[in-house]
Amino acid sequence: MKKIALFIVVSLVAGVIGNVSAQKKQKPFKGIVTYDIKYEGDIDAATLANLPSTQSSEVLGKYLKVETLVPGATIEMISNGYDSTRTVLYDIPGLGKYCVRTTKAQIMASLEEGKPADISYIDETKEVSGYTCSKADYVVEDEYGDKISIIIFYSTVLGGPELNYVGNFPGLKGFPMEYTIKSDDMTIIYSVSSVQTKKVKLKDTDFLIPTDYEEISEEDFMKKVQGE
């Protein structure tokens, strides 16, 4: 359980979850986007074995569901760009199924606590999984006031800024197709490996909270995972 708790904390800090939304004058995107996740740095084999190597995202207009599989748990994050809320579903065999919801007001309060990101859009493109993506330098400050630069290649074909507000790159004007996150001992590289749009069956109800999940606060959930 401690390994699951560690990954959840790292994920929230590092921002492993991707974002997408519909664009004006453009048919809402519907599809399944898959990321390959690579790790670089001084990482022992046991830790590396417990980190996910892929991440799958279901997209339907302003809805996004990101599924991450880790040893001993399935984590799904649902971003709702229609009402600017976020829901995280945790399915942990032996512990239970839990739902942690974040309201628009809570997200706004969190954003207001920190300094807004400094986003520089760069005249450079790169093809990622068949899509021509533009480059952005997304700069944020950590808790010590040190600046952190995240290079992102994004696509406005797959989506826009609505769900970025709910997710990890507020203000970014496109769907992040490739980005790199660096910490003191690890570099995490996310890159879209496939975009499936044909024969994809998604509906609004796929993004609702299942009835067999217990709603709980994030604080109480972390206590359960840590065995407190």
Image (cartoon, rainbow, N blue to C red):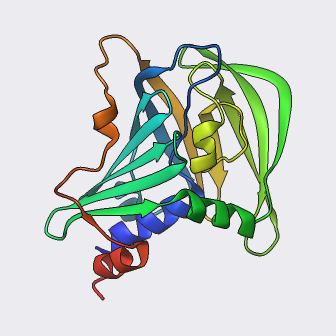
Query: Is residue 82 shown above or below 203?
Result: below
Residue at left 53%, top 19%?
129
Q: Position of residue 156 (x, y in %)?
A: 65, 23
Residue at left 51%, top 64%?
10
Asked which quadrant contains residue 184, the reply is bottom right
Q: Position of residue 151 (x, y in %)?
A: 73, 41
Asked which quadrant contains residue 60, the reply is top left
Q: Position of residue 47 (x, y in %)?
A: 40, 63
Query: Is residue 70 shown above or below 79?
Result: below
29 or 67, nearer to the observer:
29
Residue at left 75%, top 20%?
125
Query: Among all residues in the image, which is located at the extreme left?
Result: 94
Question: Could you tell whether 202 is left or right of 183 in the image?
Answer: left
Q: Is residue 72 visible?
A: no
**Quadrant housing the N terminus:** bottom left
**Quadrant housing the C terminus:** bottom left
Residue at left 77%, top 35%?
136
183 or 15, nearer to the observer:
15
Query: Among all residues in the image, which is located at the extreme top?
Result: 198
Question: Could you tell whether 113 is left or right of 224 in the image?
Answer: right
Query: Is residue 83 shown above or below 222?
Result: above
106 or 132, nearer to the observer:
106
118 or 148, nearer to the observer:
118
